[in-house]
Image (spheres, rainbow, N blue to C red):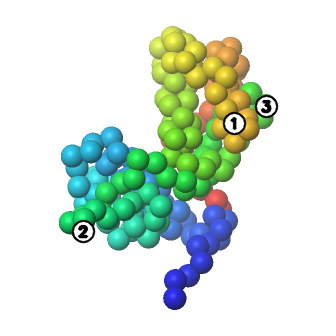
Amino acid sequence: MSRRPRRPSQRTLAAQEARIRAAHAIALQRANPNWSLSRAAREAHTTVPTVRRHMPTAVKRDTRGHWHATPADRERFTMSVTTVEHGTVPLTVAGSRKRALVGAHHAAINSYLATGNPQRLDALRGKTVAGLTLQTDPNTIRQLFRQGELSFLEIYALAS
């Protein structure tokens, strides 16, 4: 009998970190289709069983019995998102495509802060995640950075 998955607030810190590594392995295999899931898991410092346990909707088995990442998944993660409405807040983001959008937004903000070029931010203007609009105004982003609200060390928010 399989156990019901825990709510994010009930997961231990180690389990949350393992889940993030599993998601990273899936992203690596999607970005490198010729890689096996084993190689992607090794690169993400995890194992195939851990990937299968933490990301069950993101993997499937082919006719030869090999595991592969699906093109997309609906797994939910709590991520730090900088929005127009609330500044930087932890949001539950459902689906790999929306997670990729949040990752691209983080990269665009980081690029803008490093170079002063808002081109990557402009490409995300008007995009929404969980019903909230992503912040793309360069002046507001500079202000949030000066206030210490922007941190790019961790994109995934860990529940304490």
Query: Which structural element holds mark 3?
Result: loop
- Report the residue marked by disc 2: 65
Measured as percent of width and height from the top left, residue 34 is found at: 21, 46
Marker disc for residue 85: 3
As drawn, 92 above or below 119 = below
Give the amino acid at mark 2: Gly
Residue 42 visible within the image:
no
**Dot 3 alpha-carbon crowd within 10 angstroms: few under 14, some 14 to 19, many 20 or more:** few
The reply, left or right, for residue 44 in relation to residue 55 is left
- Side of 39 where 93 appears, left or right: right
Report the mark closest to the observer, 2 or 1.
Answer: 2
Query: Residue 75, image x and y in percent?
Result: 54, 56
Query: Could you tell me which residue is drawn at 55 percent across and 25 percent down?
Result: 109
**In the displayed structure, does residue 66 sit left or right of residue 110?**
left
Q: Pinpoint residue 16: horizontal percent, then vertical percent.
A: 53, 62
Place residue 149 in its image quadrant.
Answer: top right
How far apart are labels 2 and 1 at the CA level? 43 Å
In the picture as drawn, the residue positioned furthest to the right comes out as 85
The mark total stands at: 3
Q: Nearer the viewer, residue 62 or 155?
A: 62
Give the secondary structure at mark 2.
Answer: loop
* Dot 3 amino acid type: Glu
Other-residue count near label 1 (Cα within 10 Å), few / some / many at <14 / 14–19 / ≥20: some
CB under 8 Å between discs 2 and 1: no
